[in-house]
Amino acid sequence: MAEQVTIKRLGAKADGIAETSSGPVFVPKVLPGETVTVERDGSRADLISVDMASPERETPFCPYFDTCGGCATQHMKHGFYQTWKQETLAHTLRQARIESPIEPLIDAHGDGRRRVTLHVRFPDRAMHVGYMAARSHHIVEIAFCPIAEPALKEQAPVIARAIGEHLKAARKPLDIQITNTQTGFDVDVRGHGPVKDADRLSLIGLAEKLDLSRLSIHGDVIVERRPPAILMGHAAVMPPAGSFLQATRLGEETLARFVTQACERSKRVADLFSGSGPFALRLAEKSEVHAVEYDQGSMTALDKAFRATPGLRRITTEARDLFRRPLLTPELNAFDAVVLDPPRAGAEAQAKQLAVSKVPLVVSVSCDAATFARDAAILMSSGYRLERVIPVDQFKHSPHLEVVGILRRDVVKKRR
């Protein structure tokens, strides 16, 4: 049954919150002060109409915005959007009892997302290709994605549909990750499982027709026509199929700039949760670096890039699960600085070890404000000072935010 509610505020995921006699109701794609008509399903509601719009509302630029679950904030005017993101970060820090000035939000969208993941589903006799609707497995079919890099905007759906056609006999749900690299499109398909020899031959032909640099299924390389290169500083890295990558080129460059500036006087740096080396390869222009990452393939890619790039200082690598086996105090004390760039779960175990170490500088890079605040609070409780908090808007048009925190502690030098 439809009902009319008034939106009081926004939550951390950009949903509007209306207070009703039965409790709060969460409504997507609305703004504070708006009167809207919704259809409720428990505490969540679907937006039917905006009856009284906020002056901060603007027309979304994407024709799929109303149905696609990818973007959440295209209806916000830019100034309101920036303020909301900064205030959300400030609120999260206050909840962790951290009082620290937050620097202005940095727009790091650049040319757009260099990687997209499209879904292929077969809910009926037809094949459906696109993004998922919010909180749903329903596929919103798209012809283009306006927040992707120009090369990906229209070509990504073409590639996903062509691969879906080649694999449709199994009628399995496919997730097709497409990355725009320096040498062309790198495509990794998930959900199908191992393919038969005939399908492999068919996919090799398709990769040539689509001029893909690499095509893999669950990381198993079907064909590599050109090494898929990603520039990281002066180095060209060929990351493993489907491995982690910062969402935008400008986002990676921006994060790396703050990391390298903070560590510029450090002789030895530990780069933890290092991926294939977006920070390590830039840090090595001035410092010796020990890079640690769970995935051995990423470590191998980083090592190859280091050895092929002249002028870098030594980089050592270690494949290690830092959630289960964080670097311990004696290991940490060998470094002048530690860089952390964990997944959304954060680096709680590693932060606890750093808290009892003598490391004078920690640079924390996080894609989750809550776990960033939790880990920073652990460090601050042991004497670190949070000198800078820098929000980097790499995930524009979404509620997600990258945060760079620079923490220092005074280290008493031993008298000789």
Image: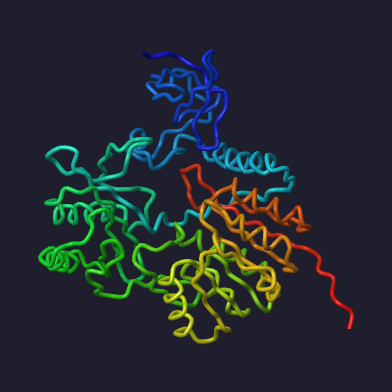
- Specify the quadrant of the image occupied by residue 74: top left
Instruction: Between residue 208 and residue 349, name the one nearer to us.
Output: 349
Residue 357 image point, x, y percent? 73, 66
Vertical placement of residue 176 versus 32, above or below: below
| Quadrant location of the C terminus in the rendered image | bottom right
Residue 257 image point, x, y percent? 59, 66
362 displayed left or right of 272: right
Q: Write the residue at 74% across / 57% down.
A: 387
Residue 337 image point, x, y percent? 68, 70
| Quadrant location of the N terminus in the rendered image | top left
Vertical placement of residue 76 versus 361, above or below: above
Residue closest to the far front:
324
183 displayed left or right of 91: left
Q: Write the residue at 63% across / 74% down.
A: 269
- Specify the quadrant of the image occupied by residue 208: bottom left
- Specify the quadrant of the image occupied by residue 4: top left
Q: Write the residue at 36% across / 33% down.
A: 66
